[in-house]
Image (cartoon, rainbow, N blue to C red):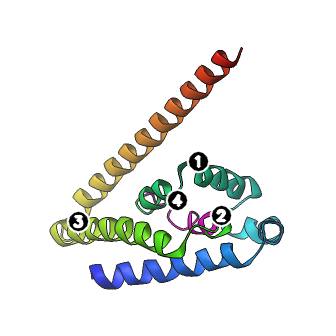
Amino acid sequence: MIISGSIGSLIAAAFLYWVGYKFNHISIFRWVDRYGKYIFLKSSDVEKSLKWFEQYGHRIVFFGRMIPAVRSLISIPAGMSHMPFWKFMLFSSLGTVIWTTFLACVGYYFGQNQALMHKIFSQVGYVIIALVVLFIVCYLYRRSKRKSNDI
């Protein structure tokens, strides 16, 4: 289960990396402007993920594999930024195996008790949201501190 889930995830990640690597920024933004609405994606989302990727590089690839909304999106900016493929796959593999193992273990241990499983996943979601909020607060604090030092 863990192996097949990880392999499937990595195949999709490699394909999306290739899309980002092969097509130029203008083509991708044009495609998102035209078809992104069908998958709830805006150009601003792609632009934001590019900025995050440029700032955090391989760390966002690793941790992004464990965040449901980011998992697929982070592959495209990695390709657009021409991150070395081996490095992309290394950090994607590490993050994917950790996340897939976590999901498989939760499914194995709590599969018969769906109410408990739902409760755990909602709490994990709250932890992820809290971490994202903490990240944003730290980022805004650093940015405001930098601006005050520039004055």
**Residue at position x 44%, y 44% in the image:** 129
The answer to whether mark 2 and mark 1 are in CB contact below 8 A is: no
User: How far is disc 1 from disc 3 in space, using C-alphas?
Assistant: 33 Å
Q: What's drawn in magenta, residue-wise?
A: 67-78
Task: Identify residue type, mark 2.
Answer: Ser
Of the numbered discs 1 and 3, the one sitting upstream in the chain is 1
Q: Which residue is mark 4?
A: 69
**Residue at position x 58%, y 81% in the image:** 15
The image position of residue 136, as x and y in percent, is 53, 36
Secondary element at tag 3: helix
Secondary element at tag 4: loop
Q: Which residue is mark 1?
A: 55
Task: Identify residue type, mark 4.
Answer: Ala
**Quadrant in which the C terminus appears:** top right
Q: Which residue is mark 3?
A: 106
The answer to whether mark 4 and mark 2 are in CB contact below 8 A is: no
The image position of residue 36, as x and y in percent, is 74, 67
The stretch drawn in magenta includes residue 77: yes
